[in-house]
Image (cartoon, rainbow, N blue to C red):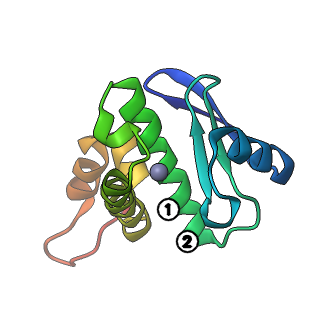
Amino acid sequence: MNLKILGLDYEIVIDQQKFDKACEEANFKLENTFGLHSWFDRKIYIKPGLDRQTFQQTLMHEIIHAIGYLMGNELLAMSKQKNELFVDALANAFVLLLNDNKEFLEMFEEGEHKSNKLKDKFSPVTGIIDA
Ligand SMILES: [Zn+2]
């Protein structure tokens, strides 16, 4: 799958062999790495077999690294321990926002148009939204 991040195509790679190789090249320890952002070839490697929660958190974490790199923001881009904690917290905030608001993307897509439409069909007499 490809993701556009700040207008650039990133490939999301979920493959054990490619993940192992990327970890080795980046000098990351396999046992405590779930994801990896490779800036030079615009790839995000995710370890296969993660549970849904860990997958979401890892993917968002790596997307934030990619954004940080593209914006020249060292705090978000670089894998130093204190940065990692901040990137994790930010990733968690976005994951929760998306998971806790299932209609978020729909509303985001349609803008205020959708909520206005619902308001028009709401009857204060019956309390029924005639959708
Ligand atoms: Zn990281």
For this orientation, the residue located farthest to the left is 124
Please report contact status of discs 2 and 1: CB closer than 8 Å, yes or no: yes
For this orientation, the residue located farthest to the right is 17
Residue that appears at 24% across and 43% down: 112
| 97 on left or right of 60 | left
Image x and y of residue 58, in percent: 54, 58
Is residue 108 placed above or below 81 in the rendered structure?
above
Is residue 78 placed above or below 92 in the rendered structure?
above
The residue singled out by tag 2 in the image is 53
Residue that appears at 42% across and 50% down: 105
In front of the other: 4 or 27: 27
The residue singled out by tag 1 in the image is 57
Q: Residues within 10 Å of mark 2 (few under 14, many from 20)?
A: few
For this orientation, the residue located farthest to the bottom is 126
* The residue carrying mark 1 has its beta carbon less than 8 Å from ligand 1: no
The amino acid type found where label 1 is placed reads Gln
Q: Quadrant of residue 71?
A: top left
**Residue 105's disc number:** none
Spatial CA span between label 2 and label 1: 6 Å
Secondary structure under tag 2 reads helix
Q: Quadrant of residue 37?
A: top right
In front of the other: 70 or 5: 70
Secondary structure under tag 1 reads helix
The amino acid type found where label 2 is placed reads Gln
Residue that appears at 81% across and 43% down: 18
Is residue 101 placed above or below 64 in the rendered structure?
below
Q: Residues within 10 Å of mark 1 (few under 14, many from 20)?
A: many
Image x and y of residue 17, in percent: 86, 48
Image x and y of residue 116, in percent: 22, 49
